[in-house]
Image: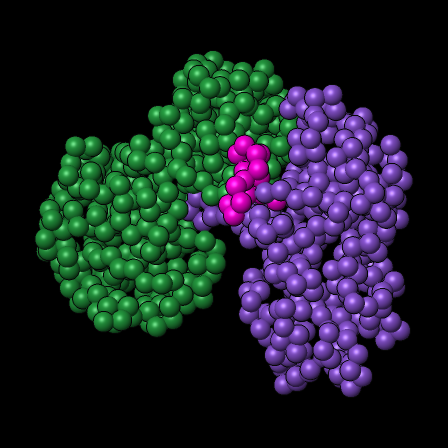
Amino acid sequence: MSEQAILRFVEAPTEGDFEALAHQAFTYQYASVAPFRTLCDRRRATPDTVSCWADIPMVPTRAFKSTPLHTAAPKIVFRSSGTTDAATRSEHHHPFPELYHRVVERSFPAFCIPDHDRVPMLSLIPTLARVEDSSLSFMIDHVMATFGTDASRNVVGARGVDLRALRSWLGARQREAEPCLVLATSLSLEQCVEGLERLGLRFRLPPGSAVFETGGLKTRSREIDPEDLRARTEHRLGVGRDRTVIEYGMTELTSQAYGGALLDRAHDVLLCPLWMRSRIVDPETLLEAPDGEIGLIALLDLANIGSAIHVLTEDLGRQVDGGFQLVGRATGAELRGCSLTAQELAQPAE
Amino acid sequence: MTAAAEVAATWKRLCVRGATTLNEIGPTRLLEAWNGAIQTFRDPETQQRNHLMPDLARQVGMSEPCLAASLEALLDGFAPPFSAEVFTRVSAQRAAGPFVVVLAATVPGLALQPLLAGLALGRAVLCKQSSRESSFTSAFVAELSRREPALRGAVATVTWKGGDAAVEEPLFDSSDVVAYGSDETVYAIAALADSRLVAFGAKASIAVLGSGPADLDSIVEGLTRDICLFDQRGCLSVQAIYTEGRELAEALHARLGSRDHGLGPAARTWPPGKASAAAMGRVRHERDAATLLGKAVADLPIGAGTVILDPEPRFVPSPGLRAVRIHPLDSLVELAEALSPLRGRLQGAAVAGTSSAELARISELGFSRVCQPGELQSPPAAWTNGGIDLVERLSVPPVVSG
C-alpha cells in the first residue's frame, strides 16, 4: 500500500471504502513497523484475525515518546512542546508531509471558513521558522498560505504576541468590515486578551469573523478556564463562542477534529473529517464506552499511514451527538504519596 | 461563625491553655491516653473503629478491607514501645506555643506523627484536615479527649478551604506549621510561614533484591503488602523493584504478577478502591507502551495491578493503581545511577537478599527508611520522615541564661 490510496480517499472520501482502506493500512503498518507488530502479536490481533477497523490494535500516544514509529523514511520530525511533561516529548517521524498538507486543505476550510475561499487571518501561533518541529506551526503556516488573504499577518515575535502589531491589525479589520479569522492557541489567545485588557482596548471584528482555538487542556504552565476566556474574547474582539472553532489535534496525528460552531452544531462537540473516526473507550477493557460516559479518546486517522493509524490518546472525552467532547487529560500531575507527582519525579531534583 | 473566626477562636484557646494543660496532665498520663487511643483503632471490634471505617473509606476512595489493613500497619508503629520512644527523646522541654498541622487527603493517618510529637514536647496542636478526608484525625482526637478530657484544651481539629487568606495569613504568619500536601499547597504556606514551615512531600520508595539467599514466596508476600497498602498512594509505597540479575527479575515478575500469587489474590483480600477514568487511562498507557516496546507485562486486570519487566534500569514513576516496574541490574552497584531521577526524593527501601556491605551502600543512597519487604508501611513513631526529625524541628531551644 502507498500513501497515494489514502490521498485519493482524502480527496474524495465519499467514493472510497473506509473499512477496506483501514485494513490495508493496518496490514501495511503491521508489516513495516516492528514495535507495532509486537503489540499486535501480543494481542493476537493480526491482519488475518481483524476484520473491523475498531479492532485494529491502538498505539498509545505515550509510545511516541519512547520509540520512532514510521513506515517509510521520515521527511520531517514533529515534536510535542512538552506541555505536560517537559522531560519527555512525543516525536512523530512523518514520512508524508505532502499528505499532511492535503489533509489540512480538505478539512480546515470546511470547519473554519465554510463560507469563504480566503479571509484575512491573524495568527497568534509561532511560524515554523520559529518553532521548526511544531506540527501546529506546520499546519498554520500552510493554512495562512493557502486560505489567507494578503492582509493576513502573524504577530508572534521572539517575545510572544506583539501587541502593537495586534492592535494595528485588529483596528484595520474593524474598519474594513470584511470577515476575518483569528488563529490561536488557548494560551496565546489568553495573552492577546490580557494585552488588550491592559491597554483598555475593545474591538468589534466584522460579522462573520471567527476564532480558531487549539490546545485547550494542554497549556504550558497554568490552567485556563475556557468559558472565562471565551467570555473575555467576546468582550475584547466581539467574537463569541458561537463563532469559536475549537481544534483538536496532536503531534502524533496527521488529521484534526474540529468543533462544529460554524456548522450549526454545538461549539464544543468535536467532529472528524471523513477519513478519521473517533471512539471513546473504557481504559480497562478498551471496549467502546456507552454514550455520555467518560473514557479515553481513540482515533483512527487514515492519514497517519506513515506511523500508526489507530491511536489511543491520553485525553479523556465522551461521545455525544455524532462527535465527542474533550473533558480532561489522563496524564500529568496526580498527587502521589504525601505530596508526590509522577510528572515531577520524571525530572531530576536540583 | 465564619471559618476565620472559628479557627481564630480555637487557636487562641490553644495559645492560652495548651501548654499549661499539657504540663498539668504530664507525660505519663499523656502516653497512657495515646496508647489507649491507638489500641482503640487497632482493635477491629471497637465501636469507634467500626463507626469510622465506612465514612473514611468513602472519603479516601479505598475499599474497607484495604483501608483497615493499611491503618493497622500504620498504627502498629505508633503503639508501645514505639510511642514511648518519642517521649523519652524529649528532656526538659519548656512551655511553648502551639503549632499547626496541615494535612493532605491522600493518606489517612498523617496526623499521628505530629500529634505525638506535640504531646511529647508539651506543645498544643491545631490540625487542619482536608475537606476530602475529615474523618480520621477528628475521630482520633475525639478518642484522645475521651480518655483524657483536659486534652480538649490542647488538641483540636478544624477544616477550612485551603487558600482562604482570612484564615491562613494571621495563622501561618505567627506559628510553626507542619504541612503535608501538594507542592502548590506547600509553596503557598511557605510564602507565609517561611522558615517556620516543616514540609513533607515529593518522596518515593522502592525495593531492592540482591542475589543472596532469600525466600521468594515471603518476598512476594511482603512486596505485595508494601505495594497494595494505602492503594500505593503513600510515600512509603513501593513503585519500582530492582533485582540483582535477570533470572530473579523474571521469577519475581511471574510470581508478583500472577493471578494466584502476589497482586492477583491481593486484589481479593484488599480490593483496590474505585479508580477514575484518568487514573485507569494513565495505567493503560503505561502498559500498552511497555507492550509495544517488547517489555513483559503481567496478565492481570488493570484494577488488580500492573507488573512490567523493564530491562532499562532508569527509574520511571509509577502511574499508581498498584503498578510497579521490575528492573534487573547486573550488579547493585548500578543502583545509584538508576535512581538518579529520584535524587533527593528517596524515602523507603524494602531490601532482601543483600550482603551487609550492599545493605550499607543502599542505606547511603539517602533513604529515610530501610527495612525488610512487608514492613515499609509500618514506620516507627520516631521515624525521620523524609530525613526530618520532627521532634527536633519542633523543639524550642532552651533559654540560654547569663
Colour seen for chain A:
purple
Q: Residue furthest front?
A: A15
- Viewer-closest of A263 and B129: A263
Residue B276 in the image, given as x and y percentages of width and height: 47, 43
Q: Residue at 85% across / 66% down in the picture?
A: A117
- The vertical placement of B274 against B170, above or below, is above
Asked if the stretch drawn in magenta spans residue A292, the answer is yes
Q: Residue at 41% across / 63% down in the picture?
A: B189
Query: Is residue B360 left or right of A155 when viewed as pictured?
Result: left
- Viewer-closest of B221 and A91: A91
- The vertical placement of B331 against A219, above or below, is above
Q: What range is drawn magenta here?
A: A281-297
Query: Is residue B261 left or right of B341 when viewed as pictured?
Result: left
Residue B244 in sight from this viewpoint: yes
- The vertical placement of A36 against B254, above or below, is below
Residue A260, picture quadrant: bottom right
